Image: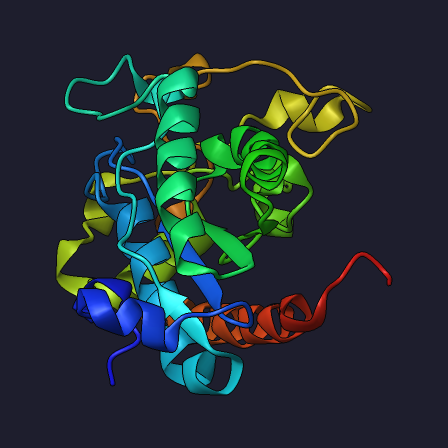
Amino acid sequence: MSRRYEDLTGPQVAEVIGPESILLLPVGAVEQHGPHLPMSVDHVIAHETATAVVERVGDELDVWQLPTLSVSKSNEHAWAAGTLWLRAETLLAVLRDLGRCLATTGAERLVLLNGHGGNTTLLNTALRELRLEFGFKTFLVHPSVPPAYGGTSTESELGMGIHGGLHETSVFMHLRPDQVDLSAVERKVPEALAQNRFVKFGGSVMFGWLSNDFDPEGYIGDPTGATAELGQELFEANVAHLCEQLAEIKTFDFGR
């Protein structure tokens, strides 16, 4: 049986989804990623990561893959024509509506798999709202934690390969090699931020920013050395890590 939620018939939902099931919602984005990547990057990475995870541990952990939410909060890229984005209050409302629907399945655990760093703080807020209103045990995971929120980036990018940089470009090259144009890129790292103690990506002081605050082309990092081989290595490591996280989510119960 497919573990894609939308492949179930109505009666099957009641038969196969229950309190021990994990509902996995991939959340991506459709937004500019510079001249070398299509706008689908975050959608593709979220969707393909969720698919790989469910293929690996779906049966073992009773995980059901929900349809990918492809348009989300991307207004740091609103300056770029073509970017699709929802207001913060709209995305929260969409998640609330989905939560109301999913609560009818009886599943107790809802996991948001976020492929777009700009969603991170809002989705963290959504976790509590969904828990409060619908009683879900809620969790936020990432294919890899965004560098702006404490995740790792390369030393050569000074920890700031946060959007269209080496790792993201490499992973996308692994997934969609025919859609990457490295001839269009150069290094775009905001070197001056690295000198700050606090106010920088991953620093203890967060700051509001738009992707064209640093460069008109709107990508932040150094994708010039990206390869599909590196992307495959990163993708497979991310999937393995997420499988381990879901195994712990499966039994999580607030320490009781």
Residue at 30% in and 68% down: 13
Viewer-proximal residue among 41 and 65? 65
Q: Where's residue 154, x and y in %? A: 59, 52
Using the rendered view, name the quadrant where residue 124 is placed: top right
Give left or right: position of 249 versus 223.
right
Image height check: is 38 above or below 6? above
Using the rendered view, name the quadrant where residue 100 is placed: top left
Give left or right: position of 20 versus 224.
right
The number of discs equals 0
Q: Which colour assignment does the render follow?
A: rainbow
Residue at 53% in and 28% down: 122
Image height check: is 120 above or below 256? above
Q: Which residue is the extreme one toward the right?
A: 256
Residue at 43% in and 69% down: 235
Using the rendered view, name the quadrant where residue 31 is placed: top left
Q: Where's residue 57, x and y in %? A: 47, 82
Viewer-proximal residue among 132 and 197? 132
Give left or right: position of 159 versus 62.
right
Q: Where's residue 1, x and y in %? A: 25, 85
Residue 214 seen anywhere in this rendered image of the structure: yes
Viewer-proximal residue among 117 and 24? 24
Q: Where's residue 181, x and y in %? A: 18, 49
Residue at 21% in and 35% down: 35
Residue 215 seen anywhere in this rendered image of the structure: no
Quarter of the C terminus within the rendering:
bottom right
